[in-house]
Amino acid sequence: MKELLSGKNIVVTGADGGLGCALVETLAEQGANVWACCYGGGDDGGSADSEGAWPRRVRLDLADRESIEEAFAAIRDARLPVDGLVDNAGIMRTSLFQMTTEASLREQFEVNFFGPYVFTQMVCRLMARRKSGSIVAVSSVNALEASKGKSAYGASKAALAACISSLANEMGPLGIRANCVAPSAVRTPLLDGVSEAALSELVENCALGRIAEPGEVAGVIAFLLSDEASYITGQCIRVDGGLFA
């Protein structure tokens, strides 16, 4: 079977998280060369002469503008085309609206929206030169519908989805596509702070009756990055197992 992403160079943020690890694995299986941008750091800086080894780890802290600039420089200086970007990194803090602190609100927007916004601006420059590229942002079903305790998280992910919609409109004439995926609960460490009661309720309201596995979301993202999705842009695709409440 033909690999969806054979020879394509893809940047993935949050590559050291649960979904991020699945993304790196899935994209590599589909033939992609992956810059794995990790909060925990990298050892080769994305250098093009790192014995040709992929994936290449790049340190990226989306709450730190200097780190964003350094990560972008490492990718740019590799002097390789960038065919795709996955804005996957994110954090979630659960608290009721009246109990959410300004510090928590700002932290979530910094990592989930402001950082990805700036980093995507930078990567878009490389794509614009070649008039080609695909961007996929990981939003959330919490951006699309009400969920207790997720006002700040949902708002930050809704902002990201709105940004991607606008980006698709602006960059389409340059051959750059931009889409979102909006997963519901995915079996990753991000769920560690979610109560069993909340997860049980979600499963009960899901047509498939279970939580998503990371690879199932990663597979949708791989498709959107590929040429098979060449006429799909400006979309926010729910990957939620059929939530009906």
Image (cartoon, rainbow, N blue to C red):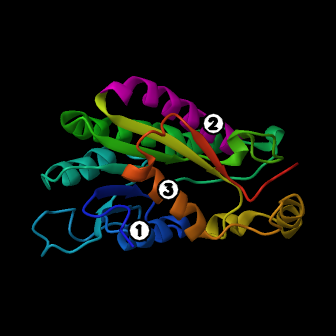
In the picture, measured across the screen, residue 139 lies left or right of residue 225, that is: right
Q: Kindly report the distance in space between the C-alpha atoms of the residues bearing marks 1 and 3.
A: 11 Å
Give the residue number, with chain letter if any, for mark 2. 158
Mark earlier in primary sequence (3, 2): 2
In the picture, measured across the screen, residue 81 lies left or right of residue 95, that is: left
- Taking depth in this image into account, of 105 and 77 the one nearest to the observer is 77
**Residue in view at x 81 percent, y 53 percent:** 243
Q: Position of residue 81 (x, y in %)?
A: 19, 50
Callout 2: SS: helix
- Taking depth in this image into account, of 197 and 208 the one nearest to the observer is 208
**Residue in view at x 64 percent, y 64 percent:** 190
| Numbered mark located on residue 221 in the image | 3
- Taking depth in this image into account, of 199 and 242 the one nearest to the observer is 242
Q: Position of residue 170 (x, y in %)?
A: 40, 23
Please identify, in this view, whether the residue under mark 2 or under mark 1 is nearer the observer.
1
Q: Are the residues flagged by discs 3 and 2 in contact, CB closer than 8 Å?
A: no
Q: Position of residue 177 (x, y in %)?
A: 40, 38
Q: Residues within 10 Å of mark 1 (few under 14, many from 20)?
A: many
Q: Quadrant of residue 207?
A: bottom right
| Numbered mark located on residue 24 in the image | 1
Q: Which residues are magenta?
A: 152-173
**Residue in view at x 20 percent, y 38 percent:** 130
Q: Kindly report the distance in space between the C-alpha atoms of the residues bearing marks 3 and 2.
A: 18 Å
Please identify, in this view, whether the residue under mark 1 or under mark 3 is nearer the observer.
3
Q: Is residue 139 above or below residue 171?
A: below
For residue 161: magenta? yes
Q: Kindly report the distance in space between the C-alpha atoms of the residues bearing marks 2 and 1.
A: 25 Å
